[in-house]
Image: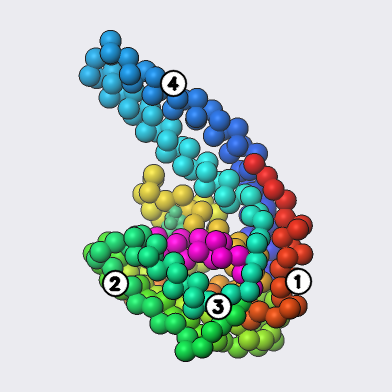
Amino acid sequence: LEEQLRQSQKMEAIGHLAGGIAHDFNNILTVIVGYGNFLEMDESLCKQQHEQVDQIIAAAERGSQLTRGLLTFSRKQVMNPRILDLNTLVGQVQTFLLRIIGEDVVLQFNPAPEPLNVCVDASQLEQVLMNLATNARDAMPDGGTLSIEICWQHVDEAYARSQGYGAPGRYACIIVSDSGSGMDRATRDRIFEPFFSTKAVGKGTGLGMSIVYGIVKQHKGFINVYSEPGEGTTFKIYLPEASSETGEDVSDQALAAPELG
Ligand code: ADP
C-alpha cells in the first residue's frame, strides 16, 4: 500500500510538472520545426547543410512526440463512459491491433460466450489495448502470438482490500498474453512507473504502461502483470460489471477531472 501511495503521489507530481512544461515546450518545438522547414527550401544550402537541417527537424519532431505523450499522461482525460459489451469493443479494435503488431505476430481473440456489460470510455479502453499491443510487438521482434481473452472473474474482499480501492464483486476481465521476451522481477516491479523504460533512447518514452494504469484505475478496475524472462507476459485487466451505480460513480469522477494543457 505504501508503495502504491508513493507511486500515485509521484504520478501526480510528474503529471502537474509535465502538463505545465509540455505545453510551452511544444510551442517552442513547433517554431524550430517551422523555421527548419523554411531553411530546407533554401536553394543556396549545400548538401551537408541540408542534412544538418534535416537532423534538426527530426530531433525537434522526436521532442514534439515526447511532449505530446506527456500531455496525454498529465491530462486526466475527461471520461465519456457508456455501458457497452466488452466482446464487441475488443472485436472492433482488432483491425488497429493487427496494424500495430504487424505480419509476424498472430492475433488470437477469444471473446466470452455471452455479452459482458461494462461502463467504460471506449476510446480510453482502446488506448489501453493499443499500448499493450505496442509493448507486446516490441517484446516479439521475431514474431509470436498475442492472445486476448475475455471472461468474468470474481474479485473477493481480500483482493480489493489489498489493492487499496474498489469493491468485491463480479468483474469483466481482459487477459492479454504475449509469447515474447518476458520480464525479470526488477522490470516487472517498475513497469507502471512513469518514464520507466528498458527500450533504446528514442524508442520508448516509459509512459505507455503508466497511461494504462491510470485509465484502468480511473475506471475503478485493477491490472495485474504475470511475467518471467523468456516465458512471455500476461496482463489481466479487471473492469467492474456495469450497474446503474457504477455508471453514476464513473461520471461523477469525470466531472471532477481537471483539463490541463
Ligand atoms: P515503453 O514501452 O515506452 O518503454 P511502457 O511504460 O509502455 O514504456 O513500458 C515500460 C517497460 O515495461 C518497457 O520498456 C518494457 O521493459 C516493459 N514491458 C512492458 N510491456 C512488456 C511486454 N509485453 N513484454 C516485455 N516487457 C514489457
Q: Earlier in the sequence, mark 2 or mark 1?
A: 2
In the image, what residue type sits under mark 4? Tyr
Q: Quadrant of residue 44?
A: top left
In the image, what residue type sits under mark 2? Val
Q: Earlier in the sequence, mark 4 or mark 2?
A: 4
> From mark 4 to mark 1, how far is it between C-alphas?
49 Å
- Classify mark 3: helix, strand or loop: strand
- Classify mark 4: helix, strand or loop: helix
In the image, what residue type sits under mark 3? Asp
> From mark 4 to mark 3, how far is it between C-alphas?
48 Å
Q: Main secondary structure of the magenta part?
A: helix
Q: Nearer the viewer, mark 4 or mark 3?
A: 3
Q: Quadrant of residue 71?
A: top right
Foreground pick, 197 / 112: 112
Q: Residue at x 56, y 82 (%)?
A: 116
Residue identified by numbered label 4: 35
Residue identified by numbered label 1: 248
Foreground pick, 39 / 201: 39
Q: How is the image coloured?
A: rainbow
Residue identified by numbered label 2: 106
Q: Judge: label 4 CB < 8 Å from ligand 1.
A: no
Which mark, residue 83?
Answer: none
> From mark 4 to mark 2, how far is it between C-alphas?
43 Å
Quarter of the image where the N terminus is located = bottom right
Crowding around mark 4 (Cα neighbors within 10 Å: few <14, some 14 to 19, many 20+) is: few
Note whether 157 is above or below 29 in the view shown: below
* Magenta span: 119-139
Quarter of the image where the C terminus is located = top right
Note whether 97 is above or below 239 in the view shown: above
Residue identified by numbered label 3: 85
Q: Earlier in the sequence, mark 4 or mark 3?
A: 4
